[in-house]
Amino acid sequence: MTWSDPRGYDPLVAASAAFRDRHPHVRIDWDKRSLQRFESTPVDELAATYDLMIIDHPHVGEVVAQNCLLPIDRHGDPALLEQLASETVGKSFHSYFYGGHQWALPVDAACQVQAIRPDLCDAPLTDLSAVIAEARAGRVLLPLRPPHVLMCFFTLMANLGTPFPVSRDGALDPANGRRTMEALQALSDAVDPACHGMDPIAALDALADGSRAAMIPFTYLYAPYAQAGYRPNRLSYHDIPAAGLSGPLGSALGGTGLAVSARTAHPELCTEFALWVASAGMQSGLYTANNGQPGNALAWADATVNARTGNAYHQTRMSHEAAWLRPRHAGYMGFQEEASHILLDALTGKATHDSALSALHARFLESFPA
């Protein structure tokens, strides 16, 4: 099971066909679901049906609690795992390590970056105040559909130097929490109200297909949009604009990992496939040639891979290396959904900023198992 975007589906189908050349008796068929369902469906529900699945790293705490995935390190060669760990983009490999085991391999790396229309925008913006000015001129889109409103909040908080807490012992900095809410409010008020119903794919489609909006300051990297002919207008990707003084750090990490069900009857074969798909050779070649967005750092540095996407990987590397890792404990996913709606209530005037910040922290503490 994967998600129904060419980036999530095409490279896995191509890899599975090539894997059959190595193992003629093996056939891997992929089903797909929408991005929204991918982000919200419990992993144990998928693992009951599928041998292999693409997962989102914030699920790993629940994975451990439910014992529904097979640790990759149970059958994976330790030397290969060590090599992949050294070839990761930022925290991508580490994001699937939890409770002493590796639960998935990062076949796709992403974080929030800046997308622009080069024909409508001379250069990426580096300062959030300039972005807000562009938004007030009607030239900015921003995906605010849950959970992406929360991802924007996370990115801005971390970029200001006080990341959202990841443990029950952490504190939410009230001053920077207010600064973050004010910045997010300014953006939300300035962009088209339709942005409240947009996820990154919808926002990128609108940017690539339209004639007025020139940029998205915070959206997850979808490199195929930077390929010639993928959409009517080609996009260009760059590091996020900074709200703080330290440049493009703190972007909320995304990406996907390839995991194996604990119920599979073919654990060694599935593990072999996952390791092979995550390898530098596959990621730099067949995977990226079929709309894939690699998780391997050697693919990110590859000149051919970058040429295909207008240097999207070179131009967003700093944001990815300095990305912020979300909480991953069992209970986080419920918090992510509720927190998104707390923020939307504040941005639409149904709650004050201070009450929203208090509710966010209280709900976060309640999300941890007793």
Image (tube, rainbow, N blue to C red):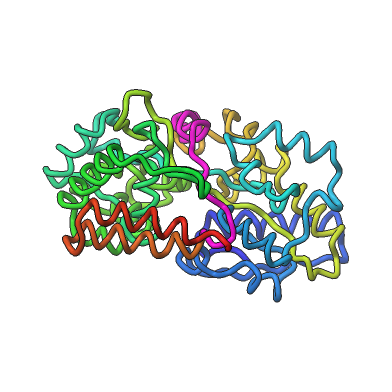
Residue 273, compared with residue 345, is above or below; it is: above
Name the residue at 78% across, 40% down. 81
Count all numbered tags in the image, as a single digit.
Answer: 0
Q: Quadrant of the N terminus?
A: bottom right
- Say if residue 113 shows up in the picture: yes
Nearer to us in this view, 205 or 228: 205
- Say if residue 227 shows up in the picture: no
Q: Quadrant of residue 178?
A: top left
Name the residue at 87% across, 58% down. 268
Residue 164, compared with residue 43, is above or below; it is: above
Q: Position of residue 228 (x, y in %)?
A: 43, 43
Q: Position of residue 295 (x, y in %)?
A: 61, 42
Horizontal side, residue 221 vs residue 51: left or right: left
Horizontal side, residue 141 vs residue 66: left or right: left
Residue 53 is inside the magenta segment: no
Name the residue at 20% across, 33% down. 129
Magenta stretch bounds: 311-332
Residue 312 is inside the magenta segment: yes
Nearer to us in this view, 330 or 306: 330
Nearer to us in this view, 182 or 84: 182
Horizontal side, residue 119 vs residue 370: left or right: left
Name the residue at 25% across, 49% down. 141
Q: Quadrant of the C terminus?
A: bottom right
Q: Position of residue 367 (x, y in %)?
A: 50, 61
Q: Position of residue 16 (x, y in %)?
A: 73, 59
Residue 262, compared with residue 280, is above or below; it is: below
